[in-house]
Image (tube, helix red, strand yellow):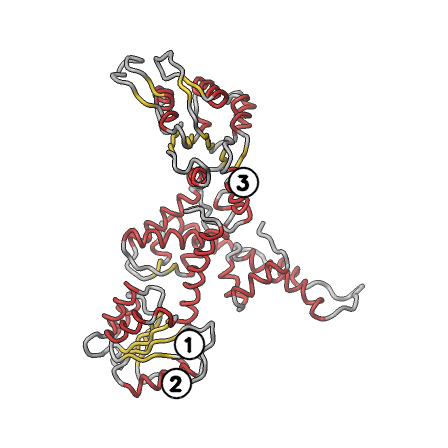
């Protein structure tokens, strides 16, 4: 048997008819895919369980078999090997069986006698599905290895700047100010700073100025002694002392009262404070990370935020871009949250459909990453299929996708079309053909990327090129989203 190409996964054929199984194996061999054969579902699971080093990517299974039929095998594969692509073959064409197979995650459903052209299309479809899942899994692993930032996900150049700032500032004691709209992940950045500091074994305490009544702000932050005010029946440890030896994350500092701003300034300068009602000064060793969802400089100019406090906390500023400005990260984040909630809910959902991904790309995400996470969590809860489809997404996202598609159809694209091919008449300078064709190719790529809101997967599909090829060309032509 010829050696299997390195980049093609092995197939497992499951059929109790050895003649059909051998015929399928020979058919796969013509495409450079080697195959193992199992007589029923139980034997198939033994192959998969014992063949971790075989790199199985495709299972072609008969429906009617002794001991363990195709439906039972599908259920077992979805539970234990969700990344495998499965094609179901049967001699009895029943709509109900086909629907059940697809619901359980089969990539395709074929009836006997098998037509070679249909089988080849199904195999290509299954291999592409497996390659996409493997690529997503590999990318997530690379992100974890490269950045190690937990739930902070993103390949956008502005997010890479965020990663670099976290790594640079974390080892110091410097105060950090995180700027960003609500839902962009400021608390995750604060925790990442803490985890990469020498204080990582100490406490990480959070305090939100915007979620606590104004009358309780100072008591919650600085603590109080018994009798400090009506209702203070015992001493209370404040957030600052609770964070001693670690990091205190103060969110929505823009909501701090003038009195709280003044007291906080002293703590930042002297690392000393007095609990409410006490005359005893306490010293504290705390690293401060603060966040705002409003521009503090504008508040300083308006006289609603202390200028001295602003310059005290704005030592190192980390700006988090809104999700609408880094649309290239939407699919990656969606896949991350899909994996997270499938694990929490013990559900097997492998991916999002192209329509669902397109709808996510068209949404403007006023709630940023938090809104996207909630949308995916909702979809995982409601979906009864092995994939997330557009119907599983919130109505606001579906409606915005419909409006965007309609607007795109109405838009006049003559300018883009005319800009693709440069004039080759007056002043033409002879040059190698490959060099002459680069600018038209660059313009075509740029126009296609813009038309798809920089969705690389959709762009590669429309241009009928491999996604890896598209990434290489984006890098070659220095194409930047914006």
Work out whether residue 403 can be spotted: no
Q: Residue at x 40, y 47 (%)?
A: 372
* Residue 46 in picture, x, y percent from top left: 27, 73
Query: Is 109 drawn above or below residue 80 in the view shown?
Result: below
Q: Residue at x 42, y 30 (%)?
A: 250
- Tell me the distance, in whole angstroms, between the alpha carbons under discs 2 and 1: 16 Å
Q: Which residue is mark 2?
A: 26
Comes first in the chain, label 1 or label 3: 1
Foreground label between 2 and 1:
2
Query: Is 170 drawn above or below residue 11 in the view shown?
Result: above
The dot on residue 121 is 1
Work out whether residue 105 can be spotted: yes
Query: Which element is circle 2 on?
Result: helix
Foreground label between 1 and 3:
3
Q: Which residue is mark 3?
A: 168
* Residue 220 in picture, x, y percent from top left: 35, 23
Would you identify the image quadrant in which residue 70 lies?
A: bottom left
* Residue 27 in picture, x, y percent from top left: 40, 84
Q: Which residue ends up furthest to the left in the rendered image?
A: 67
Q: Residue at x 41, y 63 (%)?
A: 133
- Tell me the distance, in whole angstroms, between the alpha carbons under discs 1 and 3: 50 Å
Foreground label between 3 and 2:
3
């Amino acid at each position: 048997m010829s050696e299997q190409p390195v980049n093609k996964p092995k197939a497992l054929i499951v059929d109790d008819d050895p003649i059909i199984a051998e015929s399928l194996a020979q058919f796969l061999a013509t495409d450079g895919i080697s195959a193992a054969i199992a007589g029923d579902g139980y034997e198939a699971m033994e192959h998969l369980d014992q063949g971790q080093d075989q790199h199985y990517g495709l299972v072609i299974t008969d429906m009617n078999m002794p001991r363990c039929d195709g439906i039972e095998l599908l259920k077992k594969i979805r539970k234990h090997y969700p990344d495998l692509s499965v094609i179901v073959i049967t001699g009895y064409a029943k709509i109900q069986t086909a629907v059940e197979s697809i619901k359980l995650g089969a990539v395709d459903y074929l009836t006997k006698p098998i037509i070679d052209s249909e089988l080849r299309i199904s195999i290509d479809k299954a291999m592409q599905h497996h390659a996409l899942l493997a690529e997503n899994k590999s990318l997530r692993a690379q992100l974890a290895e490269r950045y190690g930032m937990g739930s902070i996900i993103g390949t956008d150049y502005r997010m890479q700047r965020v990663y670099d700032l976290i790594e640079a500032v974390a080892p110091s004691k410097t105060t950090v100010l995180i700027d960003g709209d609500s839902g962009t992940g400021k608390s995750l950045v604060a925790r990442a700073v803490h985890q990469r500091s020498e204080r990582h074994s100490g406490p990480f305490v959070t305090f939100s100025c915007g979620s606590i009544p104004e009358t309780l702000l100072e008591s919650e932050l600085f603590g109080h002694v018994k009798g400090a005010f009506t209702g203070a029946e015992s001493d209370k440890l404040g957030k600052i002392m609770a964070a001693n030896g670690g990091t205190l994350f103060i969110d929505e500092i823009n909501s701090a009262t003038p009195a709280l701003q003044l007291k906080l300034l002293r703590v930042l300068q002297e690392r000393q404070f007095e609990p409410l009602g006490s005359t005893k000064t306490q010293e504290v060793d705390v690293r401060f990370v603060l966040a705002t969802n409003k521009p503090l400089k504008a508040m300083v100019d308006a006289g609603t935020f202390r200028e001295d406090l602003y310059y005290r906390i704005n030592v190192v500023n980390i700006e988090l871009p809104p999700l609408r400005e880094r649309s290239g990260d939407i699919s990656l984040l969606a896949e991350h949250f899909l994996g997270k909630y499938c694990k929490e809910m013990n559900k097997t959902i492998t991916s999002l459909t192209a329509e669902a991904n397109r709808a996510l790309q068209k949404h403007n995400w006023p709630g940023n990453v938090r809104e996207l996470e909630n949308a995916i969590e909702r979809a995982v809860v409601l979906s009864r299929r092995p994939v997330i489809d557009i119907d599983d997404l919130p109505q606001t996202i579906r409606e915005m996708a419909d409006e965007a598609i309609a607007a795109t159809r109405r838009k006049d694209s003559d300018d883009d079309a005319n800009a693709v091919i440069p004039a080759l008449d007056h002043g033409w300078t002879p040059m190698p053909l490959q060099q002459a064709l680069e600018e038209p190719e660059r313009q075509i790529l740029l126009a296609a990327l813009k038309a798809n809101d920089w969705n690389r997967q959709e762009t590669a599909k429309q241009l009928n090129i491999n996604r890896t090829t598209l990434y290489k060309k984006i890098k070659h032509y220095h194409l930047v989203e914006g």
